[in-house]
Amino acid sequence: MDVIKKNWFSESCEMWPGSTFSFEVKKLLHKERSPFQEIQVFDSTSLGRVLVLDGIIQCTQKDEYSYQEMISFLPLCCHRNPEKVLIVGGGDGGVARDVAKHPNVKEIVQVEIDAKVIEVSKKYLPFMAVGFDSKKLTLHVGDGFEFMKNHSHEFDVIITDSSDPIGPAVSLFQENYFSLMKSALKPNGIVCSQAGTYWDNMDLVKNTLNICKNQFPSAAYAITSVPTYPSGSIGFVIGSLEENVKFDNPVREFTREQLNDMDLKYYNTDIHKAAFALPNFVKNVIDA
Ligand code: SAM
């Protein structure tokens, strides 16, 4: 498929065959092939800047905060004292930006496989890459799976902000990765991973949630709205080493004023609770 036609970029991927999301391109700002993937950055007519990896939209200036805030604050607000946080992936810097806003977080470690994504994001996506300026952050370039093997009982929260399970992120959706994350957590630790959307990838949602349930005594799936992702949404699996965790009942709540002070545009306690409410056709599949 010709992905840029008459100034329109169309996303196409084997994970959602037969349909595509398109946007009008103002300018292609950057294109290169790193050792891991093809990286493109566009300026667009209606979405602002857009980061595309291997032909798949990773984030747009218009709606990136919904994803970044939710993958960060869902696990952070389910933990009583999230002092040390590990981010795997997240090469655009958006998750580091938002994790750093939580008042209890003292230390963030991030491991991103592709130095080129970091470099390009710093140049073209400063509204997200500002996360790399946080004094709380120590940034490593490397494979998150390999990194996890060398860390035990260290983190309160692990956030896996990975690309989809094709290319370098395949290992981050496998059971042995969830097992390694479990070992890397402190007691009562929590993990949260990108896990696809039920509209297009029910098998991915079910498999990733089942893996999480196998490894963690408490596990759930939550969803957020991201208009520029396939079918307009994306989900997360969240797992805790504590038993009987009610993920839809956050242990930390922030007032409207506190949320505004942190410049959180999407996340609040109502959104947190609603994120775990699932339609019947999804419950019937994942509970089966
Ligand atoms: N929000 C995005 C989404 O779900 O579409 C993800 C954004 S972020 C750019 C994804 C990052 O994960 C990419 O920069 C990619 O290089 C990184 N990544 C993929 N596999 C990885 C691995 N095995 N270890 C560390 N980082 C990885």
Image (spheres, helix red, strand yellow):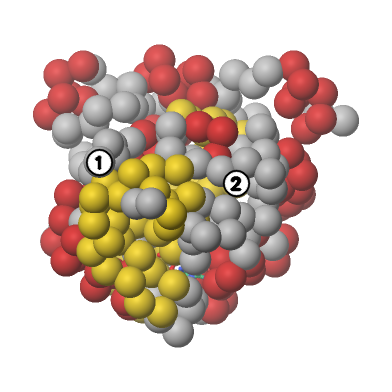
Check disc 1 and report its element: helix, strand or loop. Answer: loop
* Mark sitting on residue 195: 2
Point out residue 79 in the picture as x, y percentages from the top left corner: 43, 38
Point out residue 260 in the picture as x, y percentages from the top left corner: 16, 25
- Side of 8 relative to 37 (left or right): left
* Residue kind at label 2, given as amino acid type: Ala
Q: Nearest to the eye among marks 1 and 2: give it.
A: 1
The vertical placement of 279 against 184, above or below, is above
Q: Residue furthest bottom?
A: 35
- Side of 19 relative to 29 (left or right): right
* Residue kind at label 1, given as amino acid type: Thr
Point out residue 269 in the picture as x, y percentages from the top left corner: 37, 19
Q: Residue placed at 77% from the left, 44% from the top?
A: 203
Q: State which quadrant residue 167 falls in.
A: bottom right
In the picture of the structure, the residue carrying the numbered disc 1 is 45
Q: How would you rate the neighbour count of disc 2 (Cα within 10 Å): few for under 14, some for 14-19, many for 20 or more? A: many
The vertical placement of 170 against 44, above or below, is below
Which quadrant is home to the N terminus?
bottom right
* Residue 195 visible at all: yes
Point out residue 234 in the picture as x, y percentages from the top left corner: 53, 38
Q: Residue placed at 64% from the left, 21% from the top?
A: 278
Check disc 2 and report its element: helix, strand or loop. Answer: strand
Q: Dividing the image into four quarters, tell me where ligand 1 lies.
A: bottom left
Which quadrant is home to the C terminus?
top right
The vertical placement of 115 against 123, above or below, is below
Q: Residue placed at 34% from the left, 44% from the top?
A: 24
User: Which residue occupies the foreground of this view, 81 or 144?
Assistant: 144
User: Which residue occupies the foreground of this view, 198 or 71?
Assistant: 198
- Cβ of mark 1 under 8 Å from ligand 1: the answer is no
* Mark sitting on residue 126: none
Q: Residue placed at 24% from the left, 57% from the top?
A: 27
- Tell me the CA gap for discs 1 and 2: 29 Å
